[in-house]
Image (cartoon, rainbow, N blue to C red):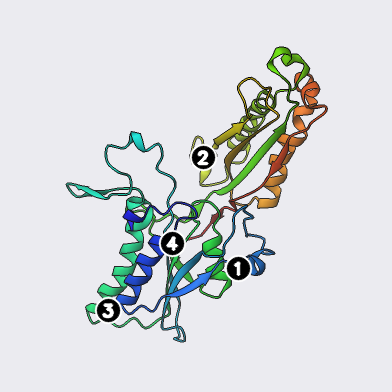
Amino acid sequence: MVKQYSVLNQEQGVLEVVERQLSDLNLSPIRVPIDVERLGSHPMFAPVPWGYDHKYNLVSVLNPGASGKSLVFNGHLDVVPATPFEMWTQRANEPWRDSEWLYGRGSGDMQSGVAAMIYAVQAVREAGAEIRSPLTIQTVVEEECTGNGALACVERGYDGDFVLIPEPFGPTIYSGQLGVMWFKVLCQGTPVHVQDTSAGEDAIERLLLLIPALKDLEAELNEHHRVPPYDQMEHPFNLNVGKISGGDWASSVPAHAEFEARLSFPPGMTASQFMQMVSDRIESEPYTATSCHAVFAKQRPVVRFEGFRSEGHLIDV
């Protein structure tokens, strides 16, 4: 699995590896597509600018009609990019061992967990123990950016009373999770030649003025919205501006700029509520400051929500 380097929209290789392994173990894999027409109206569906024509999840179901409580093993096959590759001492998608540790992109998060949950089922069967209750194995894509893979499985009925997700957190049971929101902020400018930059409006400089507004929102969340058990953590909610681009030419005032960011939010707050908070910071609050008002008077920034809009949760265990 690690050799496949299964970043976004390049998951086909790892899907083929897992599908073949499930078949070899007589676990009868089922392909579960991410059907946008079917999922698009679901409140938890994350809109994205890419398509899903050749993307799917893999599910295996044991004892689907049996009585008793049902269990789901869920694990994701996708990984985040390993760039810059020059910072690696070895190839990122070429697994290697050092003592008892396995290295390579995805070996920890979370292809080792996927392997563990599949072979746990196989080990029980080889030991001669009978699995009597319904058990579903979900191996999904897009856990790292949308959650649409797991949503597609649940929407198709591959659900359960309990779910175990073997993420790499060690011998610890996590019964809660923060909400996560992805969004993009776009600014327009007025392009002119560098001979008279004052005649134009620099989209990159405008864009940078908006990051402090989001940092203020991050601080507000950590000061006023730390619900238990996150009130025991000093800084549970984190902003990350992870990608930025803009302009076309070093000698032209940039006409466009954008950044992509991630910000977490507390359980109990809905995705729509938090989207409104982010929009208010970007599309409204900057214009109340005298220093910013003139800059955004003609061209106001735009917020687009693409990717994660996952609400947090707390489970009483």
User: What residue did someone put label 2 on?
Assistant: 236
Q: Nearer the viewer, residue 137 or 199?
A: 199
Q: Residues within 10 Å of mark 2 (few under 14, many from 20)?
A: some
Q: Residues within 10 Å of mark 3 (few under 14, many from 20)?
A: few
Rounded to the nearest angstrom, the CA distance separating label 3 from label 2 is 41 Å
Instruction: Tell me whether circle 3 and circle 2 mark residues in contact (CB < 8 Å).
Output: no
Q: Residue at x 80, y 26 (%)?
A: 288
Rounded to the nearest angstrom, the CA distance separating label 2 from label 4 is 35 Å
Q: Amino acid at mark 3?
A: Arg
Camera-nearest label, 4 or 3? 4
Camera-nearest label, 1 or 2? 1
User: What residue did someone put label 3 on?
Assistant: 125
* Mark 3 or mark 1: whose residue is earlier in sequence: 1
Quadrant containing the N terminus is bottom left
User: What residue did someone put label 4 on?
Assistant: 12
Q: Is residue 295 above or below residue 164?
A: above
Q: Nearer the viewer, residue 257 or 30?
A: 257
Q: Amino acid at mark 4?
A: Gln
Q: Quadrant of residue 46?
A: bottom right
Q: Amino acid at mark 1?
A: Asp
Tell me: 196 left or right of 226: right
Q: Which mark is residue 35?
A: 1
Q: Residues within 10 Å of mark 4 (few under 14, many from 20)?
A: some
* Mark 1 or mark 4: whose residue is earlier in sequence: 4
Q: Picture coordinates of residue 312 (x, y %)?
A: 57, 52
Residue at disc 3, secondary structure? helix
